[in-house]
Image (tube, coloured by chain):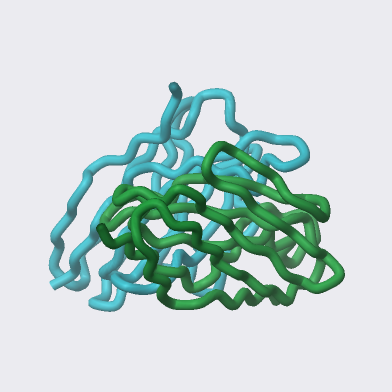
Chain colours: A green, B cyan
Amino acid sequence: GQSLEQPSEVTAVEGAIVQINCTYQTSGFYGLSWYQQHDGGAPTFLSYNALDGLEETGRFSSFLSRSDSYGYLLLQELQMKDSASYFCAVRDPGRTGSARQLTFGSGTQLTVLP
Amino acid sequence: EPEVTQTPSHQVTQMGQEVILRCVPISNHLYFYWYRQILGQKVEFLVSFYNNEISEKSEIFDDQFSVERPDGSNFTLKIRSTKLEDSAMYFCASSEAGAGGAETQYFGPGTRLLVL
């Protein structure tokens, strides 16, 4: 099966940089995704790393090291609106080996303080 | 920008009643999913659907659950006889085919189900 570990909470101030780590154990690996979820809202796709290295999308970057089964999400120039839960996720190939559902981590609640 | 829509946004029902949750996935997507999230917990996979049939289901998705794509646009989740523990937010999602498509899923706003 798939399992992911990430910190439950992170707090930072506006303008700061924060890193949210994720380690995973998977049977079959297709890449690591990150989703953002505001309270009561839908998970929203942020980024996907299939290969090692850093992917940058504006203020958000995501990193993957497949040899370490580890990735992180880096949020720069934090804003109050970044306060949300952040989930890492991996594809679960399921019984058939070709399934496409996601297994999510437990989520990291980011609080941005003024 | 295309989006996944879900109705109703909230549903309150009595234990033992049937509920149907409705979703309209993004029109050119081929894979559809239902997930649920119990308050304060992580998002959990229920079922995936492709080519008009279930492709995978989790152990949560027992005989009380069923899915249908009754026409070219709607995708429904039916819970036949609701239990208290079915109270959760239910999210529909869809994704494209192709590499990376599974990892980039588009979620609807959810239906909050409360079973009394």
Q: In which quarter of the image is residue A90?
A: bottom right
Q: Quadrant of residue A73?
A: bottom right
Q: Which of B63 and A39 is in front in this view?
A: A39
Q: In this view, does A73 lie above or below B74?
A: below
Image quadrant occupied by the C terminus of chain A: bottom left
* B18 horizontally vs B106: left or right: left
Q: Is residue A81 above or below residue A57?
A: below
- Residue at 58 percent across and 52 percent down: it is B48
- Residue at 18 percent across and 72 percent down: it is B15
Image quadrant occupied by the N terminus of chain A: bottom right
Q: Which of A4 and A108 is in front in this view?
A: A108
Where is residue B106 drawn, in percent x and y?
Answer: 50, 40
- Residue at 39 percent across and 54 percent down: it is A37
- Residue at 74 percent across and 67 percent down: it is A95
Q: Which of B64 and A9 is in front in this view?
A: A9
Q: Does the rendering let one see residue B20? A: no
Q: In which quarter of the image is residue A85?
A: bottom left
